[in-house]
Amino acid sequence: SQGVHRPKRPELVKALLLDACAQQLLSGGPLSIGVVADIAGVTKGAVQHHFPTREDLVHALYDHLAEEFKRKLQTTVPALRLRGGMPE
């Protein structure tokens, strides 16, 4: 029998996994590949394909959040300076 073929969307899957990781960390519950897979609605194999270990997943989440923070600063700080809300 043939399995269902779904188009691969690795960036979407990574985003789902990072979001699931963040949700689990915020909940205070234990972090595992299985829990992240359940929250994201994917298999453990899918998680391990993108992030072989929990540490890899947490590091990727940290990098993602740091980049997001940097992007927000780059748009917020110039706007504050224009309105006179922040010294040069």
Image (cartoon, grey):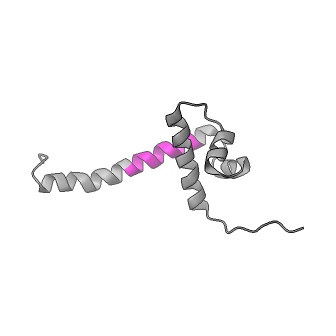
Residue located at (64% from left, 52% from top): 50
The verdict on residue 76 being magenta is no
Q: Quadrant of residue 8?
A: bottom right
Q: How many circles with numbers are drawn on the protein?
A: 0
Foreground of the two, 14 or 43: 43
| Quadrant of the snapshot with the N terminus | bottom right
Q: Which residue is rendered at x = 22% and y = 51% of the image?
A: 77
Q: Which residue is drawn at 60% across and 57% down?
A: 13
- Name the chief secondary structure element in magenta: helix
The magenta segment: 57-68
Q: Residue at x 75, y 68 (%)?
A: 5
Which residue is most to the right?
1
Where is residue 44? Give x, y as percent.
71, 47
Residue 64 falls within the magenta-colored stretch: yes
Q: Is residue 2 left or right of residue 58?
A: right
Q: Tell me: 70 left or right of 60.
A: left
Task: Estimate the x, y position of residue 83 in percent, counting from the top left.
Answer: 11, 54
In this rendering, is residue 14 above or below 56?
Answer: below
Residue 35 in picture, x, y percent from top left: 65, 40
Q: Which of 16 and 56 is in front in this view?
A: 16
Q: In which quarter of the image is residue 10?
A: bottom right
Position of 1 with respect to 23 (left or right) is right
Picture coordinates of residue 82 (x, y %)?
Answer: 13, 57
